[in-house]
Image (spheres, helix red, strand yellow):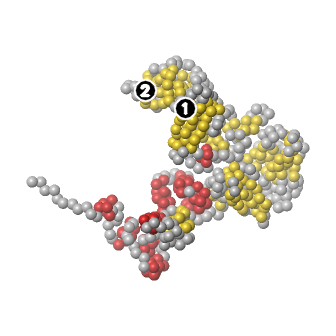
Amino acid sequence: LDTYRRQDGTLVVANRRNAGILLVEPKIKASFDATLSIKNTHDEIILSLEGKSESREYKLRKQEVAKAIELAGVFGVIEGKLYLPFEQGSKIKAGDSIVEAIKESWSVPLHVPYASELKVEDGAPITQVVKADAKGAVHYFLLEGDYLESNVEIKNGEVVDQKGLFAVIVDKENREAARHYISRGSVIEAGSGSQIERGDIIVRPQEETQIVIAEWDPYSEPIISTTSGTIAFEDIVPGITASEQFDEVTGETRLTLNEYIAANFKPTIVLATDDGEVIKYALDPKTAIFVNEGSKVHEADIIAKKAKAAIKSSDITGGLPRVSELFEARRPKDIALIAKIDGTVRSGKPIRGKERIYIVSGEKEVEYIVDKGKHILVRDGDFVHAGEHLTNGHVSSHDLLEALGEKALYEHIVSEVQQVYRRQGVNIDDKHIEIVTSQMLRQVKIVDSGDTRFIQGDLISRVRFIEENERIISRGGRPSIAEPVLVGITRAAVGADSIISAASFQDTTKVLTSASISGAIDRLEDLKENVVIGRLIPVGTGMKNFDSISFKENIEE
């Protein structure tokens, strides 16, 4: 997390994305001065500490360590995962935490927006009331390496000053029942050896005040100066592109850009730094300007603010079309552009009045054309992860599948559908939505036909794809390659492998005609077709595995 510092000492968030604030507790602590080496294997991350006279190695499961895309808040949940605060080759001092467990996280800009005022310092201990999770005797231990040792004697009322202190509650058999991390600055309420009940307070903070992590104005988006300098205006002309407006909250009159600005005007605040550098801040319509032309500004000063659009509440009637849109896999009208690859944002020349941006990663470059009226959320030089929003709007399920894969798509559809129903107090288990989503993903698109019967571009079921590939591989041939495709539930039902199942849903004449022309065979492998013709459905004891089982009466002599 990068920060600016104002003249009064206030820290301000300088990142627009790919940053966050983490509440962590130490997991592995260095016991000597060393150089850190990080090695990645297929399923492990190996941390090696090389000191002058000793060395040590720690192995972590790769799936337990938070990834960069998760730390950026783009995808996944990181609470409970491990965080590595140091990079390859870092110099580590004795007592430094080289692995930390994430307890809470606030990502930028999902939770903490750009230009927020930070109320905590990096590395500052956060003290909270800690209550016992079990009944037993309390003992205090210090973290050494990756295990607890050094039984510490601590008395009631003592203020903790050690880093890596844990309170361990043991039961009557001297087994660990619960473990709690105790941060520096906490006041001990239960000394070593104290008998406590579940829910009793073990430690408390020195001051009973609520800890504020960050503060910001929820109703506006500020534009701040990145350094000190002198202000100049471009295309900010009172009466043409801007007008004086009275602010009822502050009681001041400010120069505010008009809602509609001619295409040949590009209102911009220009900051000339003391070093002779020129920094430009492009302004959107309806932005209020907080500085005057020719005035001096300092680092992190607010130079303009844009009011955020009011969020309209929606009832179930307005939400159901969104559910239909998701389940029918339609592209939303107000579609948002998302990054398809990790890379750096580069601005391009506008084309036919539309903005053009690129994401560059090495030699690979992806172009995006932004429609008029869309608000671009990224700036030139920003690094973005695949799946991040480039503009405002609703994410297309097809774009998300292409950028992040099936797991992210499942989470997206479940989240979007649940939002509609939870607003009305309706609880639906995730598994029901996941079953529908799995049916929408039952087909794949052939990219390379190999030696199979398929043709490039064919949409076929996963079952047929797997069966055909297994047949070709067993004969030593080259298998086909396919990519997942999202289809609406209506199209998924009509495109089922079973003739009876597809014909009983929609387009009966078309399905039966196509089946008769191609000589298709229905193997009666799923539920619906067996229900239609009155056969035993293939679930439970009706599955084919039990066909060969016979029963005979057990007659006692």
- Which of these two is toward me, 244 or 510? 510
Amino acid at the residue labelled 2: Val
Q: Position of residue 466 (x, y in %)?
A: 46, 64
Q: Position of residue 354 (x, y in %)?
A: 76, 63
Give the vertical position of 75 relative to 400 (above or below): above
Q: Is residue 467 left or right of residue 406?
A: left
Amino acid at the residue labelled 1: Arg
Quick one: SS at disc 2? Answer: strand
State the separation of the CA atoms marked 1 and 2: 30 Å
Give the vertical position of 457 relative to 219 (above or below): below
From the image, tell me which residue sits under label 2: 170
Q: Position of residue 519 (x, y in %)?
A: 42, 79
Q: Residue at x 63, y 39 (%)?
A: 88
On the question of residue 201 being in view, the answer is no
Residue 334: numbered disc: none
The residue sitting at the right extreme is 294
Residue 56: numbered disc: 1
- Which of these two is toward me, 268 or 317? 268
On the question of residue 2 being in view, the answer is yes
Within-10-Å neighbours for mark 1: few <14, some 14–19, many 20+: some
Q: Is residue 392 left or right of residue 100?
A: right
Q: Residue at x 57, y 35 (%)?
A: 48
Q: Nearer the viewer, mark 1 or mark 2?
A: 1
Q: Residue at x 46, y 31 (%)?
A: 178
Q: Residue at x 56, y 28 (%)?
A: 54
